[in-house]
């Protein structure tokens, strides 16, 4: 029986949709993996993140704190950094991974490497250095976790974001047709780059940046495949979306012939998210004959996208309301799960990345209704490291594979990254109220 998005409305949705998931119910042992100190730290950090003024000014506040020397560095490291970051050295990351394993969770590394569309282009050496760092992370991840770990790839770490915008404009008309898009992907896979015909109007410099970026992505994914590490190309700004998704499709065409190795990220808060899903599924299965792999997120650049759209005097690509975003997200999930159910013999895979309980219940109930079992290996879930343990733990207990997206990098690079994520994930942080309730109950249970 098909479930509708409207079934998630009302206070009794927990009884109607996937009632076997015990979210929202405090149970002894739910947070037993956390020390009392870690519970108190989480309560402090998540409480601070619930204030708009702190989230709005997070970049400035963290920048100001850096002027106060060693003391401020220690405070940041012992609070926000330790709460949300895996570390900057192998030994600490190994401890994090061991903790995840004891709880049945799998590592997904989020490298702190990216470039804003308004940043100046970096030198070739920077992008070469970044791909070397990514290869090192793939080696580290493989050595620590053998259960299909993931490393995320920000394409703006291996080529300029401004170049991606130029490529995006050149590809806009091609994305109107699945067959045209498939031909471009095939051309990228089989034809020498200097012969590529789909880049009219792109400058010689940007073509060179693009070709070098493709080479770097190919080197990285090839190594990851050999190491048994999955790669998810991360979503970035809307003005780069088509370029990034085309790169992801090209990598899928090269590496997803026998199993899923590399995939794309779809942002559910975009008005055209569902159209993108349909196009990718059509191109991969029917036109290229390879496995689709992807992660569906709600989205991570809402404020920035609206600012950029207003600056260009263009319509916002973001859904007009939270409810519209939820409908878009759930529609994307439903479409992919139906695709997986109809193509079980394939090795395609969907990673459902959300902290929204209703969307998780919707996905789990849909999986059951379609007869997709957790052992089929067709789907998995993900939440952010340092958050949503009250969701991750019950999901694991119900037999689902769950990843924790874990940033990795030095404090100097992670601080601005965390500040951006705080602003972009304000709905997640404000929605952590239930998580704070669980933490308080666990703390009180230990005291009394």
Image (cartoon, rainbow, N blue to C red):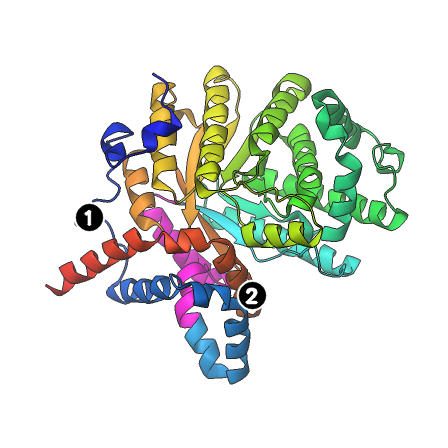
Location of the C terminus by quadrant is: bottom left
Q: Secondary structure at mark 1?
A: loop
Residue under label 2, please give it: 416
- Please state if 99 lies on the left or on the right of 169 as rendered: left
- Which residue is drawn at the image coordinates 54% and 64% (left, top)? 414
| Mark 1 Cα shell of 10 Å, populated few (<14), some (14-19), many (≥20) | some
Judge whether residue 281 can be spotted in this image: yes
Up-down relation of residue 136 to residue 7 (above or below): below
**What separation in Å lies between label 1 and label 2 (alpha carbons)?**
34 Å
| Mark 2 Cα shell of 10 Å, populated few (<14), some (14-19), many (≥20) | some
Q: Earlier in the sequence, mark 1 or mark 2?
A: 1
- Which residue is drawn at the image coordinates 49% and 82% (left, top)? 70
Q: Nearer the viewer, residue 315 or 121?
A: 315
State the image coordinates of residue 341 (x, y, percent, origin top left): 45, 18
Residues rendered magenta in the picture: 77-105
- Please state if 253 lies on the left or on the right of 180 as rendered: left
Residue 380 covered by magenta stretch:
no
- As drawn, which residue projects farthest toward the left? 448
Location of the N terminus by quadrant is: top left
State the image coordinates of residue 62 (x, y, percent, origin top left): 51, 72
Quadrant housing residue 282: top right
Up-down relation of residue 298 to residue 412 (above or below): above
Q: Nearer the viewer, residue 304 or 133?
A: 304
Q: Nearer the viewer, residue 219 or 194?
A: 194
Q: Main secondary structure of the magenta part?
A: helix
State the image coordinates of residue 381 (x, y, percent, origin top left): 41, 38
Residue under label 1, please give it: 26
- Please state if 74 lies on the left or on the right of 7 as rendered: right
Residue 81 covered by magenta stretch:
yes
Q: Secondary structure at mark 2?
A: helix
State the image coordinates of residue 215 (x, y, percent, origin top left): 75, 43
């Amino acid at each position: 029986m098909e479930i509708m998005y409207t079934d998630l409305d009302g206070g009794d949705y927990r009884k109607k949709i996937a009632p076997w998931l015990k979210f929202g119910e405090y149970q002894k042992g739910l947070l037993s993996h956390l020390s009392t100190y870690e519970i108190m730290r989480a309560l402090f950090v998540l409480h601070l993140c619930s204030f708009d003024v702190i989230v709005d000014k997070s970049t400035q506040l963290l920048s100001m704190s850096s002027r106060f020397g060693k003391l401020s560095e220690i405070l940041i490291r012992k609070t926000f950094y330790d709460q949300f970051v895996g570390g900057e050295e192998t030994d600490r990351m190994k401890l994090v991974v061991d903790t995840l394993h004891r709880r049945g969770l799998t590592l997904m590394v989020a490298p702190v490497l990216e470039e804003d569309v308004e940043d100046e282009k970096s030198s070739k050496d920077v992008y070469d250095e970044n791909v070397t760092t990514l290869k090192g992370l793939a080696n580290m991840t493989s050595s620590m976790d053998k259960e299909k770990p993931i490393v995320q790839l920000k394409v703006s770490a291996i080529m300029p974001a401004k170049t991606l915008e130029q490529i995006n404009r050149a590809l806009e008309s091609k994305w109107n047709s699945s067959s045209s898009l498939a031909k471009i992907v095939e051309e990228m896979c089989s034809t020498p780059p200097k012969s590529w015909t789909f880049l009219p109007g792109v400058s010689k410099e940007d073509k060179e940046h693009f070709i070098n970026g493709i080479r770097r992505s190919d080197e990285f994914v090839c190594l990851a495949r050999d190491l048994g590490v999955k790669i998810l190309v991360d979503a970035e700004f809307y003005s780069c979306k088509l370029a990034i998704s085309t790169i992801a499709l090209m990598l899928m065409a090269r590496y997803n012939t026998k199993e899923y190795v590399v995939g794309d990220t779809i942002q559910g808060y975009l008005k055209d998210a569902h159209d993108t899903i349909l196009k990718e599924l059509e191109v991969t299965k029917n036109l290229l004959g390879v496995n689709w792999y992807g992660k569906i997120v709600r989205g991570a650049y809402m404020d920035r996208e609206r600012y950029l759209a207003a600056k260009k005097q263009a319509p916002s690509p973001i859904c007009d309301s939270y409810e519209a975003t939820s409908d878009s997200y759930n529609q994307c999930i439903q479409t992919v799960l139906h695709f997986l159910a109809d193509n079980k013999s394939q090795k395609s895979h969907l990673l459902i990345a959300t902290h929204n309980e209703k969307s998780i219940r919707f996905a789990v109930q849909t999986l059951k209704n379609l007869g997709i079992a957790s052992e089929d290996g067709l789907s998995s879930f993900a939440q952010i490291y340092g958050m949503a343990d009250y969701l991750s733990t019950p999901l694991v207990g119900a037999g689902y594979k769950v990843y924790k997206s874990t940033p990795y990098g030095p404090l100097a690079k992670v601080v601005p990254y965390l500040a951006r994520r705080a602003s972009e994930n304000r709905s997640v942080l404000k929605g952590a109220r239930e998580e704070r309730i669980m933490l308080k109950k666990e703390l009180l249970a230990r005291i009394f």
